[in-house]
Image: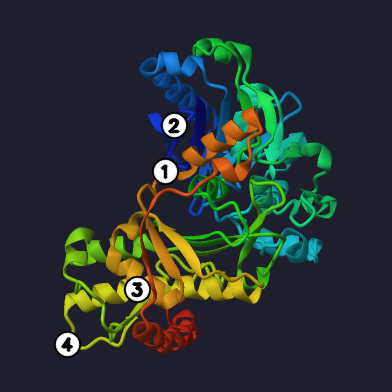
Amino acid sequence: MYIGIDAGTSGIKAVLVDDAQQIIGTARASLTSQSPHDGWSEQDPEAWWNALLDVMDQLHRAHPSEMASVRGIGLSGQQHGAVLLDEDRQCLRPCILWNDVRSEAECRIFEERFPRSRDVTGNLAMPGFTAPKLIWVQKHEPDIFARTRYVLLPKAWLRLRLSGEMIEDMSDASGSLWLDVGARRWSEEALNACGLSIDAMPRLCEGTEPAGVLKADLARRWGMRAAPVIAGSAGDNAASAVGLGAVKTGDAFVSLGTSGVVWCTTDRFRPNADSSVHAFCHAIPDKWHQMGVTLSAAASLAWWSDIVGKSERELLAELPEKIERPSRAIFLPYLAGERTPHNDAHVRGAFLGLDKNMPRSELTQAVLEGVAYSLRDAQDAMTAAGTRFETADVVGGGAQSRQWVEILASVLGVRLSRLAQGEQGGAYGAARLGRLASTAEDVTTICLPPERLETIEPSPSLEAAYGERQSRYRALYEAARALNRVG
């Protein structure tokens, strides 16, 4: 038996997985965030701990005999958060989360202090990353900064509470802007730019490696015969990739969740930071990945649903069963800014090309296409860094719409597979890592993809038509940036 724990922003989820890789138990506890000022987002790490105890207690009550035989635990969770600890390993302040934007000015300071940062870390400095947050604390909370002895990411802090060890895996560390991603080690230059040293950092390991053992009192609390190994584990996206079996070079998936992600596993470090491509270490040894992000994927359809007062299911039902041509309207899905390739938090979205005879269904189609165009922009930014793929799995809530997947296949020009179980998330991948850490099995024999329900090919006629629409979509970004800029 193996346990995967996913510590997200809105809650902590745990899954209990057997040797046949079947989920036999799940538990969840909710979390809330605090925003004491505009643009701030914080959580108390003690709330994470209490929620983690809650979900593990739930599993123990529901599955006592299975919990007794747990051999490995894996962790996944929100990335980029800054947990500041003093000499006694006590939290000094609430964790500044990944979606906190207070440190925009500090991003510029970081890159000025560390001019090689994009080449070394593989990423632009953005407020969501950890490094600018520490510069903000140094400037605005100097007493706190002076008392800071250690800095941990959220998952590493939970590991500390579970095992007493300060250890971080490569995938999560990549999101700090303190890792030399190509060399898979902490960068002294990056840390020095934030007034820190390597002594403040946890020990690094691979996601599949043993990285601590559950404390004896916790093992007794949950009825375990022996204290399980805790895996190095993974950040949330890398854990999801492990759960989807995206562990070999060229394995790719597209996520149509609240935000949209294009992921491809790579055999080496391939940065393209200037186009806001994320280049991180994978949780798997000797693997990396590229990732492009659009900020409003399924969120765009949810917004449109709210505007017109129809459910998403009703709107999708109005679409033709087979998409024959692009919508005459173009939708720019910049409802919360855009990440790849523009890194523009201020641009806002738009509908263009409307006429009085255009039915609602055509606008719904335009929303789906606009998200697809945005993901094509991300794909092209990855291609510019040498990463190409011809097939990918598609996951997330949007993958339930066959029409959306058909549109996406033709816009991206790749074969897309819909999965039987594409919603297992980071917790399932974390459980796989817990198993690998405890058994040392081969990654490729354990990290298999879910069953593929069907594979959708690009339509040659639509692919050509969407190529022309993609050019128009890209040309409209500058107009949107100038006309709809906020702030």
Helix, strand or loop at label 1? It is loop
Location of residue 338 in the rendering, given as x and y in whole percent from the top left corner: 49, 69
Pointer 3 residue: 407
Pointer 1 residue: 424
Give the residue type at disc 1.
Gln
The residue at the far front in this view is 445
Residue found at x 20% / y 71%: 321
**Could you tell which of marks 4 and 3 lies nearer the N-terminus?**
4
| Label 2 vs label 4, nearer the camera | 2
Which mark, by number, is residue 15? 2
Work out whether 270 lies above or below 327: above
| Label 4 vs label 3, nearer the camera | 3
Cα distance in 3D space between marks 2 and 1? 9 Å
Give the residue type at disc 2.
Val
**Could you tell which of marks 2 and 1 lies nearer the N-terminus?**
2
Which mark, by number, is residue 356? 4
